[in-house]
Image: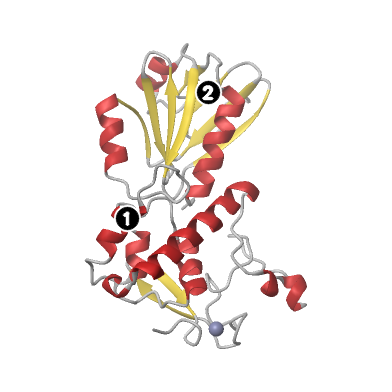
Amino acid sequence: MPEGHTIRRLADRHLELFGGQRVTAESPQGRFAAGAALISGTVLESTDAYGKHLLHRYSRDRTLHIHLGLYGKFTDGPDAAPPPVGEIRLRLITGDHWLDLRGPTACELLTPPEVKELIGRLGADPLRDDADPDAAYARIRRSAKPIGALLLDQAIVAGTGLIFVMETLFRAGLPPTMPGRSLSPEGWREIWSDLQVLMRAAVGVGRIDTVHAAHTPEAMGRPPRVDRHGGEVYVYRRAGQPCLVCDAPVRTAPLAGRNSYWCPTCQVL
Ligand SMILES: [Zn+2]
């Protein structure tokens, strides 16, 4: 599933492509035909990202909410849109550019109270200046659940996915199974500021790199990582491979319906 930096990049790109312009909206697949009809002819005024949720704000007070989920994907291109192929839920056209959305978990128009409700149930987003990390920590320190699961809970921290969470815990030297209530205020401050640093860097380059300068392929004289999830990382999807810091094999185990990854030597309490 795309992590928060991808949604932020999409929000920025959509504003760049369509901001201030009157759009034509269609639902070639038909499932969003009524919503598309309400957007069509309005002007895209702003875009925003809250965690993994993308919002388009159009004139006439229309807010489009999109959650890509596991399978959702945007494509876009210049000039006239090509003939529709596959299940296109939403197509936006201006004449200069087109944008297609396929396979989202959510593609819906929200009323202002519904937007407020959506934002209200999301946790602190490390990419947002209005985030409240103290509220997130208040929930973490009350919980006996593993810190790895708490940081993936979108009601506590929004926008984080498995890569950012596993990598931040490695960089903090904390095992993913540590109970939330064992996390010190200093530990939380370190994790929060590291999430901000890593996620902001990922917005800039469009991929997730988490290794320090001493552990890049160039610095270590090793080949770059090859993985369709991209990026130079310490533990994510590196089970059985040697830790870049201590050479111990990276471990994996189920955690909250996902797989956790950690170094048994570098991440101990
Ligand atoms: Zn290690």
At 50% from the left and 63% from the top, the residue drawn is: 163
The residue where tag 2 is placed is 92
Foreground of the two, 225 or 188: 188
Q: In the visual, does 226 lie left or right of 123?
A: right
Q: Position of residue 174 (x, y in %)?
A: 42, 77
- The amino acid type of the residue labelled 1 equals Asp
The residue where tag 1 is placed is 134
Look at the picture and state if 221 lies above or below 36: below
For label 2, being within 8 Å of ligand 1 is answered no
Q: Position of residue 228 (x, y in %)?
A: 61, 60
Q: Is residue 144 visible?
A: yes
Q: In the visual, does 187 lie left or right of 205?
A: left
> Is the image coloured rainbow, by chain, by secondary structure, or in one colour?
secondary structure
- The amino acid type of the residue labelled 2 equals Leu
Q: Position of residue 37 (x, y in %)?
A: 40, 16
Spatial CA span between label 2 and label 1: 39 Å
Q: Is residue 86 visible?
A: no
